[in-house]
Amino acid sequence: YPRQIREWVRGTDIEDAPVVFEGEKKDVSVGAYISDERHHGGGIYEVRYRSTTFYTSKKWMRKVKYEHLLAPDDPQREGVEEAGEFIELGIQDDADGSIIGNMLLISLRSDWEPVPGGKTYKQGSTIYTDVGTFLEKGKEGCDYQVLFEPTERTACEYWSTLKDYLVLSIMDNVKTRYEFYRIAEDGTSLKLVAADEEPLIRASDVRPVDSTFSNKFWFITSGYTQPSTLYIADAAKVENEGYAPDVYIEEELKSLPSQYDASDLETIQMVAFSDDGTEIPYFIVKKKDTVLDGNTPTLLYGYGGFEISLGPKYISTVGLSWLERGGAYVEANIRGGGEFGPSWHQAALKANRNKSYEDFSSVAKHLIAQNICKPSTLAARGGSNGGLLMGNMYTMYPDLFGAIHCAVPLLDMKRYHTLLAGASWMAEFGDPDTEDWDEFLNKYSPYHNIDADRENYPPMIVTTSTRDDRVHPAHARKMVKKLWDMGEGKNWPIYYYENIEGGHGGAADAKQSAFMTALAYDFMWDTLTSK
């Protein structure tokens, strides 16, 4: 990750570019950008930040003129006063700040009381205030407006700005709905003009065609059984024509071809209850006439970390390798992810990481209780942080699964922070060099929790890449070697494949990716159906 920001002029050597900002050695990274909001009635702002952990940062900002963005020797800079000093942005370290027009939008990862004795804004909210007032008077001197406040089952996914509108994407029980806000001409306020009443089971993305001059946007959608489709859309239609779902769409431009027959498939959202009673939603894709006799080969996928959300999207490999064969595919929205905002993520950090594993196992138990599958016909799959999840399913809940695919995994949580990018993840998992190891990390380090007294473990394939520059292949290598050694003479079927190329994705090109995917799916399918 970068530690220096240099101001580079085109046509010059990068080595000659002066360092204008530098982080500390212990920082995760540094960054800088320009926010030009003149088209929304605002100014130009230069922003710098130091990411002190994966989820916290220090931020500085100043207002500049167009001339300050030119090369130092550009004639247009002659006679222009130097830009003012940077002002530290007085928001919480775990909050994000963005500028639209003359508004500073603040996304909160924890509760915030900017004015002592005043209103406390809820974790997961997005609020806004006048950016000039904030820089001049600080957080205590501002009035705040709420753009979004979460409920227990909603989260702000993202927003996208157009010439006259802000489009807010909301995850509502892991489904998508939109709200459209008109940006005031002077860039000082937002007015809600249209909103979806019901969320849809689909992934969708709003990308401006040209946010400076146009209200048109590229609208991309997909679902578990619907390939990605690209539309051209116009936000102005939500006001001009009256609102109805997808009224903003003008024309379908292109759609990816279907890669498998989905005509007899259905997608259903279901709910399991975790050990502490928390509702854990999950999606299941299966044939409409699936017989609930426990014999359906079922693949359960999960991640549960880094505030990354799972949700409806088209995965052709799942369709070809699993659904067309008659299997059922399941995605679990477990804690640690971002499906319900920062609180859902923070509920499974560090000492509470066990919540992710309890959630995933609860979904597995629910599938079995619904007679969709049984342990011998249930496979689990996950990669990276999801590989750690798989490692813990293997050591904590070995009797729940008939096959496991553990991809590019973290497995040795005693040493993960010494390998490649691992040190940057201590805000997620904890620091093994402190009391964190004895208090909780040792409990979910699969490498240290193999039970030598067990006679049976489920069949597992571990895959990695020699050139993985994020999660070191040593995690996978050590785990497999230890299982081979300790499992000699026992029923511990363990398989290993290391691709010599490909980075963290595990494959360097389409051919390698196809092979790695087929290897994993065939292993799981053959294992489940041969019993």
Image (cartoon, helix red, strand yellow):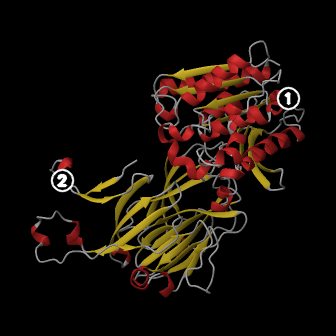
Amino acid marked by disc 2? Arg
Crowd class of label 2 (few under 14; some 14 to 19; many from 20; radius 10 Å): few
Residue 295, numbered circle: 1
Against 189, residue 462 (above or below) is: above
Residue 252 lies, in percent from the top left, at: 51, 52
- Front label number (2 vs 1): 2
Q: Secondary structure at mark 2?
A: loop
For the point 9% across and 69% down, the residue is 75
Relative horizontal placement of residue 173, taking residue 411 as reference (left or right): right
Could you say which is closer to the camera, residue 293 or residue 52?
52
State the image coordinates of residue 212 (x, y, percent, origin top left): 35, 68
Residue 376 position within the rendered picture, expressed as x and y whole percent measured from the top left: 83, 27
Residue at point 63%, 69% (across, down): 123
User: Seen in the image, is 95 located left or right of residue 64?
Assistant: right
Residue lying at 39% horizontally and 56% vertically, measured from the top left: 24
| Residue hosting label 2 | 10
Task: Looking at the picture, tell me which residue is in the foreground, 254 or 377.
Answer: 377
Pick whichever, 402 or 25, lies toward us.
25
> Please, what secondary structure does the residue beneath circle 1 have?
loop
Q: Is residue 346 visible?
A: yes
Position of 47 with respect to 414 (left or right) is left
Relative to 357, residue 390 above or below: above
Q: Which kind of residue does numbered mark 1 sit on?
A: Asn
**What is the quadrant of the C terminus in the image?**
top right
As measured in the structure, the alpha-carbon distance from the residue carrying label 2 to the one carrying label 1 is: 63 Å
Give how far across and how far down residue 180 sits, in percent: 55, 71
Query: Considering only order in the chain, which callout, 1 or 2, is on the residue closer to the N terminus?
Result: 2
Q: Where on the picture, by quarter, is residue 41?
A: bottom left
